[in-house]
Image: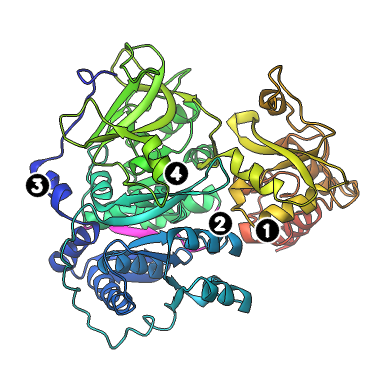
Amino acid sequence: MSTTTTTVTDLPEDVSTERGTHRVHELVARWAHRTPDAPAVTCGGDVLTYRDLDVRANRIAHRLRSLGVRLDDPVAVCLDRSPRLIVALLAVLKAGGGYLAVDPRDPLERRAALLADAGVRVLLTGTADGATGTEAEAGTYDALGVTVVHLDHATGGADDLAVEPLPVEAGAGPDNLAYIAYTSGSTGRPKGVCVPHCAVVRLVSADFLRVDADDVFLQYAPVAFDASTLEIWTPLAAGGRLAVVPAGDWSPGELTALARREGVSVLWLTAGLFHQFVDAGPEGLPRLRYLVAGGDVLSPSHVDRVRTALPAVTVVNGYGPTENTTFTCCHPVTEAVGDGPVPIGRPISGTEVYVLDEELSPVPPGSTGELFAGGSGLARGYHAQAGLTAERFLPNPFSPVPGARMYRTGDLARVRDDGGLEFLGRADAQVKIRGHRVEPGEAEAAIERHPDVLRAAVVAQTYTGGDRRLAAFYESDFPLSATDLRGHLTDALPSYLVPSYFRQVDALPLTASGKVDRAELAGRTAEERPELDNDYQAPATPLEARLAQLWADVLEIDRVGVDDDFFELGGHSLLATQITGQIATEFGVLVRARSFYEDPTVGGLARTIGAGSAA
């Protein structure tokens, strides 16, 4: 896309000024002064007003400053969804640091690796979240030189500290670090994306959402996932309310019911969850104004269905990499999509986009090229990876601003006749799995660290409805069960990077040039029951037989045993909610996520349904 055809909409003057001079926590602090008694954060029966939020965050910020946190210092936050989490994130920003959100459910090895890579010296956590619940975990953090602050001990020992804001440090400004978000790396090393305040302010004040103090946002995305940036800071910067979903996994039906009770007006869902939300029936949300979906390709039929069911709601298809702070382009759907595809639209305010060829020259409208992004949403680069930063963040020859950069997304796109953009896929091996950007090479490297694995290849396979799952193929001189290998990976990788399917092969297939034939492996979608440690046990009752068939249909395998573990069969949380939704429709029994996870077998599910039917 040439610079003459790129559409860039500037912010209104007052907000545009904020982008250039303000930091995220300063936008939130305005509302603590303007509307101190207005609710800022709610979760279940808990309510924090803007005054509460400000005072609690100030106390923890003083504690962080006393521990030596200064401008641009990374501070890890390892907490489940809760008001306490929001307070902690705000406190880090007030202290001058940038937060690194770490998922308490990730393996300790993974958490420790991220803290070490980022150079973290302080960790905010709570013992209820399990972040430092064992001697091994506490010892790991001690070995890294990390000071652990437990926020369930009141305010981490900060009750006697001042509640006033900390004085602004010399040199503080919008280019300071706001957070670090880690994404998958092709070499096996995750990449820490360093996002400045100005990039977050550009996102929360962009033109694709028009929000004010009356709006209520639902917060469900993991904070380690950059979707949370939009969820958390947009309402708090506008004086609105953040409705935090209590910790745990929630089905689409449960989320809809909660959104209804909270009066949610803006809902942001990853593509997979959006599809299930539509399938579950999106009606009954009278206050909803915006339904934002993204993270992967949207189904045109689902978009049209939700537009029909919720005609007063603006459906927005959002696109963007972490390196350009959540969203680069957005497309408000104003007419039926039909056969699709759903466009990704135009750049949001404060953003420029270019569709370029291999020589970095603009391609004509309608032609395929690689998408580059520029503007104030760009990250500063990758933490401690200068070479990779230089490779992906290039000088921007189309910008009149000296020193301007553009980010090479690796995505293919073209400009449509209406001037909007259409996403055409990746130019490399990177894929999206349940909304997370994944480099299969990272999973491959982890598999090959197993002492009995000679070579491995991990590919993304596509199933019915566009569901993508990682599949691992590996060579070994010894019989190596999928259960053993999955356990090896579970100790080192987040769940979305652990393949759903494992298969030991005599030799990986090769192309004519001698490279692993990944296309051939991607076509080997699992049809047979995978290798498990337990023998196949046939269903013994009509209910077990029906559930086994339901699992087989959803997982797209030939048969399922009564004692087979759903997750060892290749299942994941989104598929689990699909099954529980079907059970609610067919049997009239609501199976909660926790009950499913406690015994994820056909036999266990049959017992849960039996107990629910008898109740």
- Classify mark 2: residues with Cα within 10 Å, few (<14), some (14-19) or many (20+): some
Percent across and percent down for residue 538 are: 90, 46
C-alpha gap between disc 1 and disc 3: 49 Å
Front one among 187 and 305: 187
Q: Check whether the beta carbons of the residues at disc 3 and disc 4 lie within 8 A of each other.
A: no
- Labels 1 and 3: the sequence-earlier one: 3
Q: Please, what is the three-letter code of the amino acid marked with disc 4? A: Leu
- Labels 1 and 2: the sequence-earlier one: 2
Can residue 320 be seen in the rendering of this structure? Answer: no
Q: Check whether the beta carbons of the residues at disc 3 and disc 2 lie within 8 A of each other.
A: no
Circle on res. 597: 1
- Which stretch did the figure color magenta? 239-250
Percent across and percent down for residue 114 are: 50, 58
Query: In the rendered image, which residue does mark 2 sit on?
Result: 249
Q: Check whether the beta carbons of the residues at disc 1 and disc 2 lie within 8 A of each other.
A: yes
Q: Check whether the beta carbons of the residues at disc 4 and disc 1 lie within 8 A of each other.
A: no
Query: In the rendered image, which residue does mark 3 sit on?
Result: 14
Percent across and percent down for residue 262 are: 37, 58
* Location of residue 43 by image quarter: bottom left
C-alpha gap between disc 1 and disc 2: 10 Å
User: SS class of the residue under badge 2?
Assistant: loop
- Labels 4 and 1: the sequence-earlier one: 4
C-alpha gap between disc 3 and disc 2: 40 Å
Query: In the rendered image, which residue does mark 4 sit on?
Result: 269
**Vertical placement of 307 versus 79: above or below?**
above
Q: Please, what is the three-letter code of the amino acid marked with disc 3? A: Asp
Front one among 487 and 307: 487
C-alpha gap between disc 4 and disc 2: 14 Å
- Labels 3 and 4: the sequence-earlier one: 3
Percent across and percent down for residue 531 are: 84, 44
- Labels 3 and 2: the sequence-earlier one: 3
**Vertical placement of 123 versus 273: above or below?**
below
